[in-house]
Amino acid sequence: MTPKSAAAAARSHPSPTSGSRSTQTPRATVLGYPRQGADRELKKAVEGYWKGRITADTLRETAAGLRRDNWRRLADSGLHEVPTGDFSYYDHVLDTSVMVGAVPARHRAAVEADALDGYFTMARGAHDVAPLEMTKWFDTNYHYLVPELDPDTVFSAHSAKQVTELREAVALGHTAARPVLVGPLTYLLLAKPAPGVADGFEPLTLLDRLLPVYAEVLADLRAAGAQWVQLDEPALVQDRTPAELTALARAYRELGTLTDRPQLLVASYFDRLGEALPVLAKAPVEGLALDFTGPAAANLTDLAAIGGLPGKRLVAGVVDGRNVWINDLAASLTTLATLLGLAEQVDVSTSCSLLHVPLDSAAERELDPQLTRWLAFARQKTEEVVTLGRGLAQGTDTVAARLAANRADLASRAASAITRDPAVRVRAAAVTDADAHRDQPYAERTAAQHARLGLPPLPTTTIGSFPQTDELRTARAELRAGRLDGTGYEERIAAEIREVVSFQEKAGIDVLVHGEPERNDMVQYFAERLTGYLATRHGWVQSYGTRYVRPPILAGDISRPAPMTVATTSYAQSLTDRPVKGMLTGPVTMLAWSFVRDDQPLGETARQVALALRDEVADLEAAGTAVIQVDEPGLRETLPLRAADRSAYLDWATEAFRLTTAGVRPDTQIHTHMCYAEFGDIIRAIDDLDADVISLEAARSHMRVADELAAAGYPREVGPWCVRHPLTARALGRGDDRLAGHGT
């Protein structure tokens, strides 16, 4: 691209139809923004409200202040449109359930008594009232609350939140503010039949009841000043049936032909739109937002193949909203220049909401300044969008300095010794198939393990981590601040381990854990001890509700300089005659819950992590540990959204787990644990892990996972609960018939 107008260059590029050529000046926007505030003010306010420390009015004032600051910063950065309605006290899918009146019967009394408290009851439960189920938002580490619907569900419009937030933005001068809603297809496709509903009910059959509610909400937003409304439909990037595509066409035909509505922007992200693209291209909506990063880059070819989007607006997501690496601005401008020939108007955006990345890399002052130049968090990604929009609209010469700096930063990262370790690469290249398989089949191993461990027929254990007490958090803070030395900190950790072991013995637990008091996070703890990872101080992202995590950044080749868990596990074992589990986080989860390098295939990175963990497993076994748990909750989370891509993923993912664990003796028992995800479509892969025992969170999925395992004939020992909730007794009552043929 010469330092001339990218738009001019694109206009000379052949377009598939004359009507699709861009004729309007490109603009810049984002599809959503982090909610928490620079210092996690939202988390603190919500938890303060739960504890009675602040009033509902104070909570609302804090929330309004955070929205106001976000809109101001986005507008000041140069965005032409700011999103509204993406803010949430807990979860945007829960907000949608409230918006359409889909409140389960068990929560209605609480919602009617107090809307805010009832909202939180739906999210968290109360007394003997179970919360909504929680599961992963597609293949991200964000969790949403699953709508519960039944054949008798009656929808009704409650648009106060969406209208109020739009009016706030307009009153502050953001007249082009764009409300964001979860689209009707995605809402129904994510919903599940309510407990007790007869088999065969499909929530999508409620579409005709739901669409009039969306029509009413759209009319309310138009009356409040909305020019555009963004309808997020990420479920469309998954494989969809002909019946679902027919429903999609019907839904947007009905919404598109409404007269009392804003212009409609249908947004998809996380993968290519595929078979849904021609359906939406023909729909009477004014615009589409498409992802052009990662696997979704195929949208470019698909879009050209259908002749573009004549007469429509295309919001091009060329800045990755899910990872933290800087954008290749020159490459993005090339993509954008091509897209200018494929739509009436092309605007620049992030690939998805920036909810999935931290707020500001400039806050990471403890990192090497060279490293921070490789990173782009939400604020930096917004600046990248603005730069691309300006370069596209006004010519690359207007952003020449920024492009030159970007080229230098990309070259610095590619050439850095941080990203390449020859010894790690030689070891990974030497791995053979035999390295990823145990020497004995499961039937022989389990006999040896039973003989060594001497456990009862229905043994009990816990998942691993005990609650992090205020005393532990204080000790960790004092250690960071230098007010507590390493010896004093280790003494506090040892005291906590003694208490946890004693508690479990008194409770009659058969296989103990040390409680993990030394670990701040199941991934971060290991990342801080593995070469190749970077740790942030302020890189918080929302996992669910008020739980925020700081995903580590996997920047280079991975190795283990020293044992990480042997000392604490061995100390706990010295306190008891019962077996104490070694506790590790698996290689796929180490990737899934990190921001991973994007300069090599994920499978190569997973193999490096697996080899580092294999060394830890060997050291634990050598120290006498008889049971080693390798947690892989991320296995399902990272599953590709389209079925055609899954086999290759599961091949390297299951190999990485086996590479971690296959070096042990037959009488060493390997456990794994998974939680908060859909497991039905990976049961065979779970078996391919070749773990001796698996424990699965089942309480919030109403024990469905136990049924799925039983139906699949899963042959290994299973623990189908996380016993951690006041409703445990009820869960046990549901689950006892699923134990036939399984251990725990």
Image: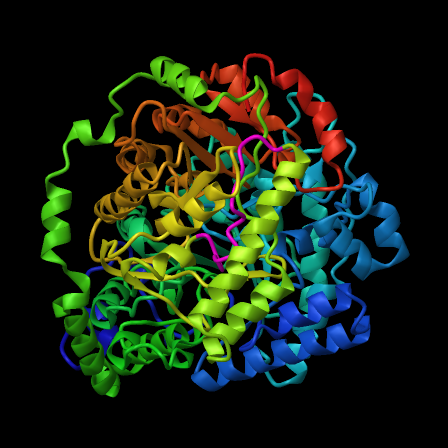
At horizontal 47% and vertical 41% (from top left) the residue drawn is: 573
Residue 407 or residue 155, whichever sits in front: 407
Quarter of the rendering containing residue 51: bottom right
Task: Name the quadrant of the C terminus.
Answer: top right
On the picture, is 176 further left or further right than 163?
left
Task: Name the quadrant of the N terminus.
Answer: bottom left
Residue 375 drawn at (x, y percent): 32, 71
Q: Which colour scheme is used?
A: rainbow
Residues rendered magenta in the picture: 509-522
Q: In this view, does 26 lie above or below 714?
A: below
Q: Is residue 336 magenta?
A: no
Residue 192 or residue 578, whichever sits in front: 578
Residue 121 drawn at (x, y percent): 77, 51
The dominant secondary structure in magenta is: loop
Q: Is residue 82 above or below residue 312?
A: below
On the picture, is 565 further left or further right than 428?
right
Q: Is residue 192 visible?
A: no
Residue 282 or residue 218, whichever sits in front: 218
Q: In this view, does 98 lie above or below 395?
A: above
Residue 445 or residue 644, whichever sits in front: 445
On the picture, is 301 further left or further right than 498?
left
On the picture, is 305 further left or further right than 212?
left
Quarter of the rendering containing residue 179: bottom right
Q: Can residue 659 be seen in this view?
A: yes
Q: Does the magenta stretch include residue 518?
A: yes
At horizontal 18% and vertical 63% (from top left) the residue drawn is: 419
Residue 224 drawn at (x, y percent): 70, 71
Residue 734 drawn at (x, y percent): 71, 24
